[in-house]
Every structure is written in C-alpha cells, then in structure tokens.
Image (tube, rainbow, N blue to C red):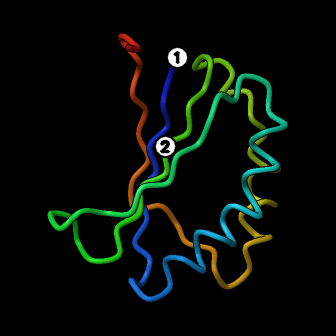
Amino acid sequence: MVVEELVFVVEPGQQARWAAVEAAAWDPFLAAQPGFVRKEVWFGTDDDPPGTVRILVWWASQAHWDAVDADAMTRVDDAMGPDRRSADRCRAHRVFRLA
C-alpha cells in the first residue's frame, strides 16, 4: 500500500469552500480508479504555515497509483475552475504496517 501526500496552501477563509469544490471534483474520479482505497483531507496545525491543507490518498499499490491517466487528472483539476491550486508538495509514503 502507498499513500500519496499532497500539500496545498489555501487562504484560511477559503478552506471550507475549496475543500467542498475539491471533493466534488476529485472524490468521484478517485472512487472510480482501480486500487483507490480512501482519501483524507487534513487542515494544518499551528506548526504549519497559515492555510496549509494536506490531502492523503491511499492506494492499494504503487502500480495502481501510477496507472491513473495523467490527462484525466488534468481534466479533473481544470473542473475546479478558479479554485484550482497547484500542490506545493507531492510525495509518497509506503505503508509498513496498519494497526
């Protein structure tokens, strides 16, 4: 299992709206992908820069994540319109153990 971590900066007063638009665009798309396990959205802590939002996407394997069509992802991003943000960081974590 692998967890994709995306970090965004969204103006603090806009986070709830952005999260709703992001969910409407991305949740149905991700749910239709083979190997998609779940998605979590975390708002930053006091230790993070203001407006930090983390999205964690759980995939059954790296191969499943790699198989997601890049052009389709671009179309989903574009569907967010003016609420689209570029990730400040994207990285992968391999799950060692689940409790």
Q: Residues within 10 Å of mark 1 (few under 14, many from 20)?
A: some
* Residue displayed at 69% across by 22% down: 64
* Residue displayed at 66% across by 65% down: 22
The total of numbered circles placed on residues is 2
* Residue displayed at 67% across by 85% down: 82
Secondary structure of the residue carrying tag 1 is loop
Question: Which of the 4 image quarters holds residue 25?
Answer: bottom right
* Image vertical order of residue 77 relative to residue 66, above or below: below
Q: Which residue is mark 2?
A: 56
Q: Which residue is at the far front?
A: 99
Q: Mark 1: which amino acid? A: Met
Q: Which residue is at the far bottom?
A: 13
Q: Give the label on residue 1, or none.
A: 1
Instruction: Give the x, y percent position of residue 16.
Output: 54, 77
Instruction: Give the x, y percent position of residue 86.
Output: 52, 67
Q: Residues within 10 Å of mark 2 (few under 14, many from 20)?
A: many
Secondary structure of the residue carrying tag 2 is strand
Instruction: Give the x, y percent position of residue 73.
Output: 74, 51
Instruction: Give the x, y percent position of residue 27.
Output: 73, 51
Question: Which of the 4 image quarters holds residue 12?
Answer: bottom left
* Residue displayed at 49% across by 43% down: 56
